[in-house]
């Protein structure tokens, strides 16, 4: 029997959506007749991205508590009750064999309801510091798939399995030969290439840094792929040139990673997992504006392993140029960072997570 039913819930950001889609794709590969339903927050990006990936999605009226005092927080308890009622209806009608949560607001009500109905549940925690939704749900689920060591400080050790984070299949095996990748960006294969990543929307402070350092970076002999984000493209496209490729969004990440000699990036969980696979020297600039400052904690886990550098936004003005130039001048240091970050890669993460899900399918249905 392979006509199983799986509910996947998670969203709000790409970091929660793309792992859920990767898990769904692997479940579909193993069980072509399986029915898969996504549940997300009705006003967030998953409502667009999941149907684009070919899956049905239902929305909940849910959001998180705002950190500052705002009238929106008055709606929070109403949204929670509404979402629990709607999640109960969705779960009762769909009757999943297993429910999977990848983090984000919507996964809370869905996994809570599913666990109450005796449906086995799996959590996937991407970060080195557990999110509040997953910490609350931990007691109710059967398995927790994590990407970092030491997660027993958040979760019961007997339920916790280190699998890694799902990443795009195209990145597991980067092109061996770079000619097509350099041609894709119209770049010079004879020059060192800096890849700057700020996420799909963009990172304001990273963009300001690159704008300020652009002439210095060129003087260092670098050519750039500068992914400034869709929100900032109109502002920074003026800097595009033969040696500076300014992009709002990068569709062919495998080409960008293939040509890069050194990378500047945020340190969201998905980015970190991808960069481990890529195995290039990375300077992380964590966003300070995320829950529990988890980007700093993600980056620090790699820094402590000698696998990356990190500069916090507040220190960029004084620290970026000397640290970056010192790294660029040392082939030994660049090689060492590339080698050590690659050692942390878990390329079969999606398969391992699905192995755990399959183990929980109720026996009477097998």
Image (spheres, rainbow, N blue to C red):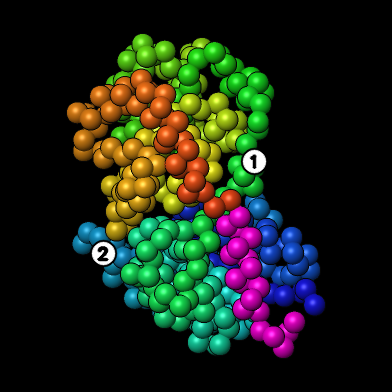
Residue 232: give x, y in percent of width and height: 41, 32
Residue closest to the eye, 300 or 89: 300
Q: How packed is label 2: few (under 14 Cα within 10 Å), some, or many (20 or more)?
A: few
The residue pinned by badge 1 equals 173
Image height of 24 relative to 215, above or below: below
State which quarter of the image contains the N terminus: bottom right
Overall secondary structure of the magenta section: helix
Asked if the residue under mark 1 is in contact with the one under mark 2, i.e. CB atoms within 8 Å, the reply is no
Counting residues from the start of the chain, the first of labels 2 and 1 encountered is 2
Residue at (51, 57) in percent of width and height: 164
Q: Say which element carries label 1.
A: loop
Residue at horizontal 49%, vertical 46%? 343
Magenta highlight range: 348-366
Can you give x and y, in whole percent of width and height, for residue 2 in the image?
A: 78, 73
The residue sitting at 34% across, 76% down in the picture is 77
Give x and y (percent) for residue 190. 54, 13
Say which residue label 2 marks.
71
From the top left corner, tell me how far across and down residue 210 is, in percent. 35, 25
Look at the numbered disc 2 and give the secondary structure of its residue: helix
């Amino acid at each position: 029997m392979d006509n199983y039913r799986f509910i996947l819930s998670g969203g709000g950001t790409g970091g929660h959506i793309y792992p859920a889609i990767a898990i769904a794709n692997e479940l579909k590969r193993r069980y072509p007749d399986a029915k898969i339903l996504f549940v997300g927050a009705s006003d967030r990006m998953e409502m667009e991205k999941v149907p684009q990936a070919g899956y049905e999605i239902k929305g909940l009226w849910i959001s998180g508590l705002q950190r500052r005092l705002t009238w929106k927080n008055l709606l929070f308890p109403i949204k929670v009750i509404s979402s629990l009622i709607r999640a109960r209806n969705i779960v009762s009608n769909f009757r999943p064999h297993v429910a999977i949560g990848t983090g984000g607001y919507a996964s809370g009500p869905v996994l809570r309801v599913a666990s109450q109905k005796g449906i086995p549940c799996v959590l996937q925690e991407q970060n080195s510091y557990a999110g509040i939704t997953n910490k609350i749900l931990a007691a109710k689920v059967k398995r927790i798939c994590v990407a970092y060591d030491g997660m027993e400080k958040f979760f019961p050790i007997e339920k916790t399995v280190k699998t890694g984070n799902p990443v795009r299949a195209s990145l597991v095996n980067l092109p061996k030969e770079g000619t097509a990748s350099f041609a894709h960006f119209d770049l010079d294969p004879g020059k060192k290439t800096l890849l700057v990543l700020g996420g799909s929307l963009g990172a304001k402070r990273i963009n300001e840094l690159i704008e300020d350092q652009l002439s210095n970076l060129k003087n260092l002999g670098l050519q750039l792929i500068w992914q400034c984000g869709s929100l900032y493209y109109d502002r920074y496209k003026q800097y595009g040139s033969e040696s500076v490729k300014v992009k709002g969004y990068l569709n062919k990440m495998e080409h960008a990673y293939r040509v890069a000699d050194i990378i500047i990036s945020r340190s969201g969980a998905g980015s970190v997992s991808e960069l481990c696979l890529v195995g290039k020297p990375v300077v992380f600039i964590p966003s300070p504006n995320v829950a529990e400052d988890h980007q700093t904690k993600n980056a620090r886990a790699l820094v402590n392993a000698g696998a990356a550098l990190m500069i916090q936004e507040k220190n960029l003005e004084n620290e970026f140029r000397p640290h970056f130039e010192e790294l660029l001048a040392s082939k030994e240091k660049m090689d060492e960072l590339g080698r050590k970050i690659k050692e942390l890669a878990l390329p079969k993460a999606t398969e391992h997570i699905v192995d755990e899900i399959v183990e929980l399918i109720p026996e009477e249905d097998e």
